[in-house]
Amino acid sequence: MNASQVERFFAILKAANPAPQTELEYASVFELLTAVLLSAQATDVGVNKATRRLFAVANTPAALLALGQEGLESHIKTIGLYRSKARHLLQTCRILLDRHGGEVPRSRADLEALPGVGRKTANVVLNVAFGEPTMAVDTHIFRVSNRTGLAPGKTPLAVELGLLERVPEAYLVDAHHWLILHGRYVCQARKPLCKVCAVIQECDYGRNLKSSVA
């Protein structure tokens, strides 16, 4: 995908969805951090079902700590790896209270120092909560970036750096939302929906597919 194709790719996605949002439900930066931490190897739908129950009774670091391990687990047990996630979340709550006045820090280093928070989670929080132009490369973005030729890479970090280099500045803040949604609903893993894809003309995979059919 060349530079002009990249520009058209994002222009089309923006025209279809001018203000993309995360599908995780949250009402504060801490709720967002909690939801993203819980979302590893889980669907946003599944996380939202659990956090609706959780946030109704505890949605601050102090309130979650008051629940304790068993209490927290009882609210999130429908989510995969809930025991380790509960442990990490409680450890994170303690650090937020002890080191950050109960607030979620906005530096990458401080975020990645929190238990259970890796680069991808930090990128989501920095982008969604603080409006920074980061790329949280999940399985959807990794697949779309490689399949389309947008930013091929063998690792999530390679794809992330490639996207930061190739995505035009005007689209950077919202780009990771567009790519996730495109991967989730159109450029799916097993069977991409190329027949209904709005950006197929800009996509390496789509052009190769059309050439093989022709």
Image (cartoon, rainbow, N blue to C red):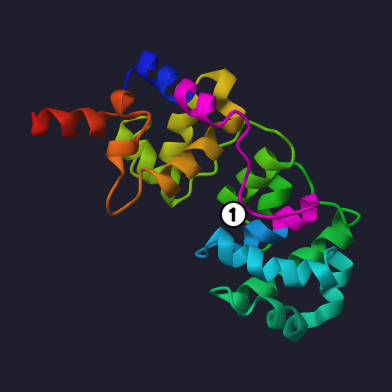
Magenta range:
11-33
Residue on which the image places disc 1: 118
Q: Position of residue 114 (x, y in %)?
A: 70, 58
Count of marks placed on residues: 1
Side of 100 relative to 107 (left or right): right
Q: Residues within 10 Å of mark 1 (few under 14, many from 20)?
A: some
Q: Is residue 137 magenta?
A: no
| Quadrant, the C terminus | top left
- The image quarter containing residue 209 is top left
Residue depicted at x 32% and y 52%: 189
Along the line of sight, the residue nearer the viewer: 49 or 132: 49
Side of 202 relative to 171 (left or right): left
Q: Position of residue 71 (x, y in %)?
A: 77, 83
Q: Residue furthest right?
A: 101
* Local SS, label 1: loop
| Quadrant, the N terminus | top left
Residue depicted at x 65% and y 68%: 49
Q: Is residue 24 magenta?
A: yes
Along the line of sight, the residue nearer the viewer: 46 or 171: 46
- The image quarter containing residue 38 is bottom right
Q: Is residue 209 depicted above or below 122 in this figure?
A: above
Amino acid type, residue under disc 1 in the picture: Gly
Side of 73 relative to 94 (left or right): left
Residue depicted at x 12% and y 28%: 211
Q: Residue furthest front?
A: 196
Q: Residue furthest bottom?
A: 70
Q: Is residue 165 depicted above or below 37 in this figure?
A: above
Residue depicted at x 74% and y 37%: 130
Q: Residue furthest top?
A: 4
- The image quarter containing residue 85 is bottom right
Q: Is residue 57 depicted above or below 150 in this figure?
A: below
